[in-house]
Image: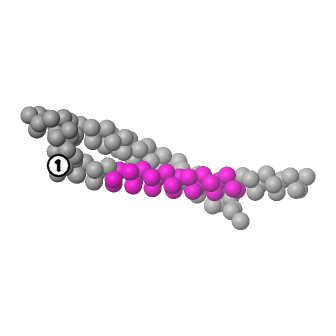
Amino acid sequence: MIDEAEVQRSVDYLMQTAGAAAQARANRVVLEHGLKRVKAIGMMKHNGLPISAQEREAYASADYKTALDGLQQAIFEDEQHRALRDAHSAKIEAWRTAEATRRSVRL
């Protein structure tokens, strides 16, 4: 059974991690859009080639691999925050349901 102290810890966690979760999401979005920039710069380095070859070279570049690695880390951090926050929200919701059931049985 979930007690009120545990619910309070979950509420506190949600409040304390809101900023970090928002920053993780912002980092992820910026890096997702940053891939387009890395690709464009990589294509510019090979502007004498056909478009498909420019894309191939851009995707194969070390810069693109570095950007992908950064994006992978940003996705991990964003999803980790989301999963933990969802778990705490679910705990609060389970407690609310149990409390409503307990009150209705008492009446």
Say how many tags the image has.
Answer: 1
Residue 33 in the image: x percent, y percent? 31, 38
- Mark 1 residue element: loop
Which amino acid is tagged 1?
A: Ser
Residue 15 in the image: x percent, y percent? 53, 48
The reply, left or right, for residue 31 in relation to residue 93 is left
Tell me what residue is drawn at x 89 percent, y 56 percent: 106
The outermost residue toward the left is: 48
Residue 58 in the image: x percent, y percent? 18, 43
Residue 1 falls within the magenta-colored stretch: no
- Front residue of this view, candidates 9 and 89: 89
Q: Which residue is mark 1?
A: 61
- Front residue of this view, candidates 68 and 16: 68
Q: What is the span of residues highlighted in magenta in the rendered image?
A: 72-95
The reply, left or right, for residue 65 in relation to residue 9 is left
- Front residue of this view, candidates 30 and 3: 30
Residue 91, located in which quarter of the rendered image?
Answer: bottom right
Quadrant including the N terminus? bottom right
